[in-house]
């Protein structure tokens, strides 16, 4: 398997907390970005209205279909390879931008659009909702192009409307309003997990830092995200293992060491138990794609 470099994009290209562009604009101004697999430190929504090609997200490959939306969480590796012109939009925003208002936190952590391992990242836009979503996007594009008073507040409002419309397409985690303190605890846990998954692998490790019991943390995170904290820990470790297996030639022993496993046999067993396939079989499958 050839080594595939991964480009890390730490900020939006405009160094702002929010961006929106047409895919035609992206093709003309950021064509180099998709030459390599890359990941962002912010959220990205790609709405493909029409066009063909493939979208690689982490270790999965998706054929582009008309009127589909891809919701990417910070840290996910992706690469969009298109065949000819593609009509659509790319929306990028930071967590801080959307969660300035506390009630917006649910849109990131309680809708299933982001931070979930239970479904495909591809959302099919229904004809009934397309017009409403297009209206929100057009208003965002118009507001983004000017610098009038309270521009960020208006953009944040239209983004919230767009995310609500998008959520209505999607049958995911229970979207009933959660208690703000539960959502905040889950948010802190996921933030800690992203920083510490290579060194902290037990629910108790995170519960101690958050001053709650492991059982309580599992229960709250499950209410908010659909899965207990233990599931998120396992899946985050496996996701990184798969990324390194797919995008580098480092050995299983090296990957195990990087992820904090002293015993490669333990890592091998963990990988198979959580992913359902052995590390070597997974790498063989990736190699023939």
Image (cartoon, rainbow, N blue to C red):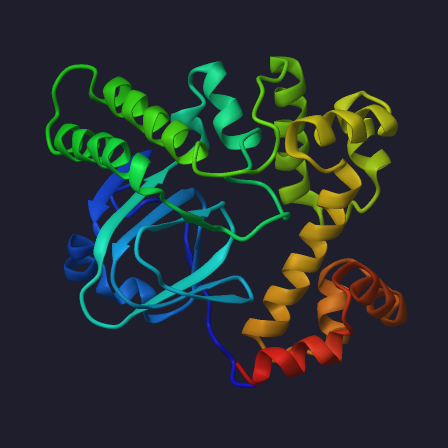
Question: Could you tell me which quadrant the N terminus lies in?
Answer: bottom right
- Please tell me which residue lies in front, 67 or 95: 67
Q: Is residue 289 visible?
A: yes
The quadrant where residue 245 appears: bottom right
Q: Position of residue 58 (x, y in %)?
A: 53, 62
Q: Position of residue 241 (x, y in %)?
A: 68, 64
Q: Position of residue 74 (x, y in %)?
A: 49, 46
Please indicate whether residue 215 sits to the left or right of residue 26 in the image: right
Which residue: 21% across, 45% down?
A: 21
Which residue: 35% across, 42% down?
A: 126
Q: Position of residue 93 (x, y in %)?
A: 36, 36
Position of 243 relative to 39 (above/below): below
Position of 119 relative to 171 (above/below): below
Position of 69 relative to 132 (above/below): below
Position of 14 relative to 3 (above/below): above
The quadrant where residue 271 appears: bottom right
Which residue: 33% across, 31% down?
A: 162
- Please tell me which residue lies in front, 252 or 137: 137
Please indicate whether residue 202 sits to the left or right of residue 36 in the image: right
Q: Is residue 198 visible?
A: no
Please indicate whether residue 192 sits to the left or right of residue 167 in the image: right
Determine the residue located farthest toward the front in the rendered image: 128
């Amino acid at each position: 398997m050839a080594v595939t470099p991964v480009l890390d994009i730490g900020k939006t290209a405009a160094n702002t907390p929010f961006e929106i562009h047409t895919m035609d604009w992206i093709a003309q101004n950021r064509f180099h970005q998709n030459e390599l697999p890359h990941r962002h430190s912010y959220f990205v929504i790609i709405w493909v209205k029409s066009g063909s090609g493939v979208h690689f997200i982490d270790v999965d490959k998706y054929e582009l279909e008309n009127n589909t939306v891809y919701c990417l969480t910070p840290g996910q590796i992706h690469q969009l390879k298109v065949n000819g012109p593609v009509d659509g939009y790319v929306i990028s925003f930071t967590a801080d931008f959307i969660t300035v208002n506390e009630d917006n936190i649910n849109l990131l952590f309680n809708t299933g659009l982001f931070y979930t391992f239970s479904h495909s990242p591809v959302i099919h836009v229904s004809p009934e909702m397309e017009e409403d979503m297009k209206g929100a996007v057009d208003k965002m594009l118009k507001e983004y192009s000017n610098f009038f008073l309270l521009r960020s507040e208006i953009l944040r409002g239209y983004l919230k409307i767009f995310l609500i419309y998008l959520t209505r397409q999607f049958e995911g985690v229970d979207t009933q309003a959660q208690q703000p303190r539960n959502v905040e605890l889950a948010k802190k846990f996921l933030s800690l997990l992203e920083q510490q998954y290579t060194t902290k692998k037990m629910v108790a490790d995170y519960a101690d830092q958050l001053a709650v019991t492991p059982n309580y943390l599992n229960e709250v995170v499950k209410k908010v995200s659909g899965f207990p904290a233990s599931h998120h820990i396992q899946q985050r470790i496996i996701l990184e293992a798969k990324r390194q297996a797919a995008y580098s030639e480092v050995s299983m022993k090296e990957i195990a060491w990087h992820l904090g496993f002293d015993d490669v046999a333990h890592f091998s067993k963990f990988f198979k138990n959580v992913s359902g396939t052995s590390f070597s079989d997974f790498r063989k499958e990736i190699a023939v794609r």
